Structure formats: C-alpha cells, structure tokens
C-alpha cells in the first residue's frame, strides 16, 4: 500500500477503471443481453455527446471554474446549424437572404458556440463575475435565444447527408465515435504535452503564483471557456445529426451529467488536479450505468437515485484515497 | 551529549519513525519536552522537524514509536484531540483562512455564542483586540486576513495559539517572517509563558535566537536524532557541527565583483495606497543597479519594500507611476509577463501563496516560468524538462526523492530552493529577491549567498530585500534603506554600520516618540 501511495494519481485512475469493469461485470450477470457487441456500440454512441461536453468541462474545472451553460449552448448551436441549413438566413429589413451549404451551416453553429464560450470567459476575466454566476446567466440566455430562433418548434428534415455524422459508420465504427476519439486524443495531448495544457493546471492550482510566473491568466481562461463552448457546439452537431432535427429543449440538464463525469473521473473541483483520461472513465461509467439500468428496465426515478449515489460513492472513495 | 535531567518532563517521545511513500522522514527520534522551558529543535532543511511536530500535534498518524504525556502513553487521532490535551501548534506554513477576519480566524471553531445562539462578534473582537495588544500588533480584529502582510499573518497565528491556553506550545519557525521589533515582542511573550509553566517547543534556523531564548536544544539530522543538551553548555559551533555533521565556514562575505554598467534604473517610482486615496505606499523612490552588483534593500515591516519590488515587476500597473529603465532603455512593464520578457526575475516572499503551485511536481515547478525552453516542435519534451530540473536540483542541492515529487511534500527550505530554481531557469538579467533565505538552514543559506554572489559575478544585477541585517551587510555591495515608503538613506559597503542602517529604517513618527530627535536623512525627492 505504501508503495502504491507514491503513485496516487495512478491508483485513482485504476480505481475508476476498476469501478467501470466491476459495473460491466455486474450488469453482464444481471442483464443477459448486456454483454454484447450491440450494447458496446450503443454505449459508445450514447456517450459521445457527453464526452464532448465533458472534455470541455474538464478544462474549465481544471482552471478552478465551472461551466453551467454547456447544455444550452449545445441547443443553440444545434438549432442554428439546422435553421441555417434548412431556411438560410433572411434579414427582411435589409432585404438580405443568404443560403448556407452544409459546411457553412455547421461552421456557423460552431462559431456561435465558441462565441458564447468566449463571452462567458470575457465576463469571468474582464468583469470578474464568478464562473458559476456568469455561466448560469448564459444557461438562461442561450436557452432564450434558442427559443427565439426556433419560435419554440423543432426544425426537422435536414437531409441524409447531415444525418451521416450521427448515424453513419466509417470502417465499421460509428462516425460520431471517430469524432469523439479524435477530440479526446487532441485534448489528452493538449493537456499533457503543450504549454497551454500545463498552464491550465498552474492557473487552477494557484492563480497568483501562475500570474507571478508570467502566465497570462486571463487569456488562458478565455481560451478555455471558448473551447468549452466550441465543444458544446460539437455536441449540438452530433445531437442534431442523430435525430435529423433540432429541438429547442435539447441538452437540457446535460451540464450536470458532464460535471458528474468529470468529478467521478477524479478531477478536483478546486482546480489544478485531474485529467481527460479520468473524465473518459467518468463518462463511460455514467454511460454504462444508464444503458444497464435501461436494459434492466429500472424505472426512471430509481435510475436517478442510483446515479446520484454512484457519484457520491465515487468521489468519497477518491477523497479517502488521496487525503491520507 | 548528556541527556538533560529534569523531572518536569511533560512530554516524552521515543523512537519516533515516520515514512512517506517509502521515504523515511523520521528514524527513531527521541525528544523530551520540559515544562516552563523553551525546548529548541534545530536541524537542516528536511531534517524532519516539522514532521515530528505534526506527529505531536495529532496531524499525522501512522508512525512508529511512543509518546508519553505526563508519563502516560498518548496517541492522538486528530489535531483536536491533541488540542484537548493542551498541545497547540503554530505551523511553519501559515494556516489561516484568507477571507475570514482576524477575529474569526483566532477563534475559529470556538466562537463566542450569545444567548440567542448567534456569534457574539462584540466579545470576539474585544478578546481578539486584547490578544493583539499583547502582541503589539495594531490592526483591526475585523481586518480580512488576506489583506495582511505575511508577518502580520504570522502574528495572528500566534494570537490564535495564545487563545488556546495550551500547556505545550509548538512554534515552527515563528520568526522567519516577522520584524525585529515583533521578534522582541514574541520573546517577551515566550518568557511570560515560560514563567507560567508552559512548555515551549521552538524551531528556528536562526541559531542566535537559541542563546537568547532557549533552555534546551535537540538536534536532528536527516530524520535521525543526533543529540540534545542544555543551551548554556553548548556553543554556536557545537550546535552547527551537530546539525551539519562537520565544521562549516563562518558567515559568508561576498567577494567584490566587477560592476559593468547600469542595468536597472528606477526613477521617481510611486505606488498609491489601495484603500486610502491620496496616500502612497511607495513614495518617489529612485535607485540604480549595475551589472554585477548586489543592492540590498533594508527596512522595517511595512516600509514598502515588497510593494516596491512588486511595482517593478509589473504587478501594480494602474496604481503606480514613475519610470523604469533597463540597459538605458525605457521599459514599459505592465504585467509580470512584460517583466520576464525584460529579463527580470522575482523571487517572492511568500512561497506558498505566490511562489509555487503546490500540487505540481518539482520538475514542473522549476520549468513553469520558462516552459518555452522545454518545448520541442511545439510540444513539451519530458527529456528537456527532466534535464532542466535535474540541473537545478543538483546545483541548488534541492533535497527531494525525485523530480516528480509534488512540491507540497518538500520541506519548507527545499520549497524555497525550488522557487529560486524556477527563476534562475528564466535566465534573468535582473533578479529581485524578497527575503530569499526565509526558513532556510545555515548551510543552505550559505549556499544561497554563494549563489547570489556567483550570479552577480556572471553579470546579473541583483536587488535583495532582507530584514536580517547581518545577512544584508554580508552580501550587499550597497544598501538603500526604506522607511514608510521613502528612501531614507544609502550606504556604500565601506559605510555599513548596524546603527546607522537601523536608524535610517525607523519611521519618522516613531523616532519623534521614542527616540531623541535626530536629524532626518534627506528624502530623495
Ligand atoms: N507529506 C509528505 N509527503 C512526502 N514527504 C514528506 C511529507 N512531509 C515531509 N516530507 C519529507 O520529509 C522530510 C522532512 O520534512 P520536514 O518538513 O519535517 O523538514 P523540516 O526539518 O521541517 O525542514 P525545514 O527546515 O525546511 O522546514 C523531507 O525530506 C520532506 O521532503
Ligand atoms: Mg519545517
């Protein structure tokens, strides 16, 4: 045990891995159909959205912040992509009409998501609004904009090409899984192998010391929130493409699942400690649990209860292991 | 070494060992603590002093060995239990809650409750005021701890411990951050606690203090018990020999270096007071430093020395005025980043709050301010970082099991060395040092002096703030004195006398009250 303590981080990582495996074993025993190729792909496609959000959330939480707006930003980016693709952009007062190609619409959605994240960052760094408050406001603002843009109705019928991302496969693997894997890979590298990544840890660990070491703390935070917004928009892209329609209520409450995943993955809410790899395990644990409980036909209310306790247990074990 | 014999032993520890992740921090240490005595513990950085104290105070469990309190076996499961048994500790690294007030910190967990079950702030403030008065610290009990200077925070910690009415008071380097005057006040307090029969455990790196205040001394080296004895029977050299295991040369004196041209010139620097409009913390300060020169900056606490360095380093761009020239060119420094780009390094006073990201490894901490040099094709290279960190660990003799160790787990002195390494890694031309030897053992101190001298030799311009007069007189080529934000005097090496320097440092207001009227040094503006 003593030797293990020297590699705390490793133990924590293995601990979530162990929890995930345990969960899979238990579910395989109780639910006959659980351990199958089908479930495997099902889980992976189901977690893809939360994976995007949680990677962004990990960056934010590592700086010691939080982003409550990701669910709403996801929705707004989604409806913007759908709206532009289907109806184009019409500004009657100026007599302007622009129609959008598939890529144009997607790009516009990603830009909107990034901008909302940037706006969060601006409020937090320039006006010193606490992240919790700034992003809580954005949660409402973005949801409001979503409803304004759609008039409250879903935008449907987006065409086959658009749906490819959410439903198609490439070399036997769902396209969305490829996308997530790429995102995860990029951010694992960013955090471990780039200055920006290292600076994120420093800012979250001790902001004052980071500033005194010459780090541009505001710029780092701004970039982190912008990335969180962009990743939420990618989530919006996946949802919209999957359903081939964009609903204004999409992503409602997703921020909580992604915070849960990050925390289960061992990232400290105080900032400065954690990893994307941990978050992946967190996302998978929640995903496996969700599908498992569904297969077992556990009623929705009970599912919530179980999920809540899993979060508590995961974090408690983590704390017990790291404090002593 | 003869064991001191005394029957009023309140606490006795035998064969204490403690291991952290396979590394032995303590190895069979013995300790006796006598009531009504000041029991000093000395040893180099990383010798295990703080670890031993944390065991006595119930902070660490899972050690080997036995502790007897009043002859009865004792084993504290948590700090509260130790406190209930009359053991209180002033930590080396401050442990106050920054956003609570002084009074709230002093009485944390033991708030006075009025008959409605609410906190009685009036009583708490009154009691706190009494304690602060006893310590001669004139701040409001309502002040937020985060607004206090580190020395003041240290005194608030002392007030906290005083309020516990403990039988055994452990002080882990209480004087490392406070001024001469405050040290005097603390010593008076220690004497009065002693007279009341309180046992004091006193850790320090300032060996002179032993002869002023301590009765017994216990020496640790590399986690092992070396010996103990009565202070009156030991000489300074005896103690050093026990600590280091060999004789070491006397106090360092800087050799002369070649000065080659002015590198830093500060003109008419002012810094506005953050709360009192119209008032200034730094008032029209001018000075110059040449390459190869060590400029000492002396002053009492609150003289504005730290703020002056902070201003040069770009931490107060909005509140400050004046101009800074580097190599004769006017430099615009609006952020630490600008300062680093201009070749300035700043070793801050408070390593825990300002110097280090405690959860980072030794290697990451050393590379943090100069991460670019460990980059290869846009990505961080472990190999380059390791090489950089290894180099400084060797050069500064940083005691750590590995460069991947978390800095939080290093002893205080070794943490300080990591901060120094971080700044040396930026390859600065100008180095600002704020109390760089705070909490560092004599051996390491000498190493740091030698290092400063070496850096000067290499052509760095060095500005060093220190409250320790012998230190600053040994190492500086020139000393300027600040008092109440003003430059009150400047001395060349040949003019250094303790008396003159101290006289220039005492604020005018105090001088009028307590000293005979003396002619003020002319202010530079
Ligand atoms: N929590 C910890 N985890 C791992 N190692 C530790 C921990 N605390 C202390 N150590 C190690 O134990 C040794 C003793 O440390 P300690 O802080 O007791 O030294 P010290 O004598 O108080 O030194 P200083 O004079 O620098 O304060 C050091 O080598 C330190 O790195
Ligand atoms: Mg110590």
Image (tube, grey):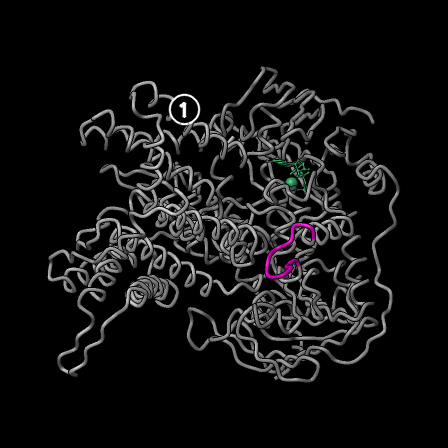
Along the horizontal axis of the image, is B393 left or right of A193?
Answer: right
Res A266 quadrant in image: top left
Which chain does the numbered disc 1 sit on?
A
Question: Please, is residue B524 above or below residue B399 in the view?
Answer: below
Question: Please, is residue B96 above or below residue B256 in the view?
Answer: above
Q: What is the x, y in percent for residue B127?
A: 41, 45
- Image quarter hosting the N terminus of chain A: top right
Q: What is the x, y in percent for residue A294?
A: 24, 30
Q: Residue at x 59, y 70 (%)?
A: B313
Displayed-image quarter of ligand 2: top right
Q: Magenta span has B407?
A: no
Query: Which one is in front, A86 or A171?
Result: A171
Query: Which one is in front, A182 or B220?
Result: A182
Q: How many marks?
A: 1
Residue A136: in sight, yes or no?
no
What span is colored magenta in the figure? B374-383
Mark 1, secondary structure of its residue: helix
Q: What is the x, y in percent for residue B378?
A: 59, 61
Query: Which one is in front, B390 or B72?
Result: B390
Q: Is mark 1 within 8 Å of ligand 1?
A: no
Res A315 quadrant in image: top left
Residue labelled with disc 1: A22
């Amino acid at each position: 045990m003593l030797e293990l303590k020297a590699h705390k981080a490793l133990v924590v990582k293995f601990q979530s891995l162990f929890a995930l495996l345990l969960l899979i074993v238990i579910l395989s025993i109780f639910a006959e159909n659980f351990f199958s190729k089908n479930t495997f792909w099902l889980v992976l496609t189901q977690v893809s959205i939360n994976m995007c959000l949680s990677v962004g959330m990990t960056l934010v939480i590592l700086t010691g912040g939080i982003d409550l707006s990701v669910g709403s930003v996801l929705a707004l980016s989604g409806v913007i992509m759908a709206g532009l693709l289907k109806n184009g952009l019409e500004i009657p007062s100026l007599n302007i009409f622009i129609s959008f190609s598939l890529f144009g619409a997607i790009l516009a959605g990603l830009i909107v998501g990034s901008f909302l994240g940037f706006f969060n960052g601006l409020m937090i760094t320039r006006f010193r609004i606490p992240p919790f408050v700034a992003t809580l406001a954005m949660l409402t603002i973005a949801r409001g904009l979503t409803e304004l843009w759609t008039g409250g109705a879903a935008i449907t019928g987006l065409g086959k090409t658009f749906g490819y991302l959410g439903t198609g496969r490439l070399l036997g693997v769902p396209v969305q899984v490829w996308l997530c894997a790429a995102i995860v890979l990029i951010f694992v590298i960013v955090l471990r192998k780039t200055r920006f990544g290292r600076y994120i840890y420093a800012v979250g660990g001790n902001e004052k010391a980071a500033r005194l070491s010459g780090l541009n703390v505001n710029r780092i935070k701004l970039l982190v929130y912008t990335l969180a917004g962009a990743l939420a928009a990618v989530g919006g892209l996946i949802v919209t493409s999957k359903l081939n329609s964009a609903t204004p209520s999409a992503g409602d409450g997703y921020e909580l699942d992604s915070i849960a995943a990050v925390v289960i993955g061992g990232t400290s809410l105080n900032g400065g400690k954690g990893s994307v790899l941990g978050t992946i395990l967190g996302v998978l644990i929640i995903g496996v649990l969700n599908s498992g409980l569904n297969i077992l036909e556990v009623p929705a209310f009970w599912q919530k209860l179980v999920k809540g306790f899993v979060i508590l247990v995961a974090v408690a074990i983590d704390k017990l292991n790291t404090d002593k | 070494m003869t064991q001191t014999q005394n029957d009023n032993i309140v606490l006795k520890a035998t064969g204490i060992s403690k291991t952290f992740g396979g590394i032995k921090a303590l190895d069979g240490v013995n300790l006796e603590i006598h009531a009504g005595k000041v029991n000093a513990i000395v040893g180099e950085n990383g010798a295990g002093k703080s670890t031993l104290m944390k065991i006595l105070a119930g902070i660490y469990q899972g050690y080997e060995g036995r502790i007897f309190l009043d002859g009865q076996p004792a084993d504290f499961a948590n700090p509260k239990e130790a406190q209930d048994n009359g053991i209180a500790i002033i930590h080396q690294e401050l442990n106050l809650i920054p956003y609570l007030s002084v009074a709230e910190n002093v009485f944390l967990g033991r708030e006075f409750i009025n008959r409605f079950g609410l906190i009685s702030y009036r009583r708490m403030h009154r009691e706190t005021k009494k304690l602060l008065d006893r310590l001669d610290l004139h701040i409001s009990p309502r002040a937020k701890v985060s607004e206090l200077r580190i020395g003041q925070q240290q005194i608030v910690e002392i007030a906290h411990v005083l309020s516990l009415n403990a039988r055994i008071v452990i002080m882990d380097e209480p004087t490392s951050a406070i001024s001469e005057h405050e040290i005097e006040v603390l010593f008076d307090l220690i004497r009065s606690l002693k007279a009341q029969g309180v046992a004091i455990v006193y850790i320090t790196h300032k060996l002179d203090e032993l002869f002023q205040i301590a009765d017994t001394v216990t020496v640790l080296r590399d986690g092992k018990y070396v010996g103990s004895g009565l202070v009156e029977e030991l000489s300074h050299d005896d103690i050093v020999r026990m600590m280091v295991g060999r004789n070491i040369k006397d106090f360092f004196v800087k050799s002369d270096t070649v000065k080659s041209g002015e590198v830093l010139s500060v003109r008419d620097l002012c810094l506005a007071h953050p709360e009192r409009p119209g008032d200034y913390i730094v008032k029209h300060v001018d000075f110059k430093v040449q390459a190869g020169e060590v400029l000492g900056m002396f002053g009492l606490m609150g003289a504005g020395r730290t703020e002056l360095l902070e201003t040069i380093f770009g931490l107060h761009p909005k509140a400050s005025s004046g101009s800074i020239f580097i190599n004769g060119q006017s430099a615009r420094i609006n952020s630490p980043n600008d300062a680093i780009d201009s070749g300035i390094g700043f070793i801050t006073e408070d390593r825990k709050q300002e110097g280090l990201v405690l959860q980072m490894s030794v290697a990451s901490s050393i590379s943090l301010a100069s991460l670019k040099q460990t980059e290869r094709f846009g990505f961080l290279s472990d190999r380059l970082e390791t090489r950089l960190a290894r180099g400084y660990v060797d050069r500064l003799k940083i005691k750590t099991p590995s460069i991947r160790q978390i800095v939080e787990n290093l002893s205080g002195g070794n943490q300080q060395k990591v901060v120094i390494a971080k700044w040396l890694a930026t390859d600065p031309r100008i180095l600002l040092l704020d109390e760089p030897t705070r909490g560092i053992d004599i051996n390491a101190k000498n190493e740091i002096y030698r290092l400063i001298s070496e850096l000067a030799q290499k052509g760095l311009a060095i500005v060093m703030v220190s409250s320790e007069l012998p230190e600053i007189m040994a190492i500086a080529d020139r000393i300027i004195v600040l008092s109440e934000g003003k430059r009150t005097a400047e001395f060349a090496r040949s003019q250094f006398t303790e008396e003159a320097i101290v006289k220039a440092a005492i604020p005018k207001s105090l001088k009028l009250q307590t000293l005979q009227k003396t002619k003020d040094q002319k202010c530079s503006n």
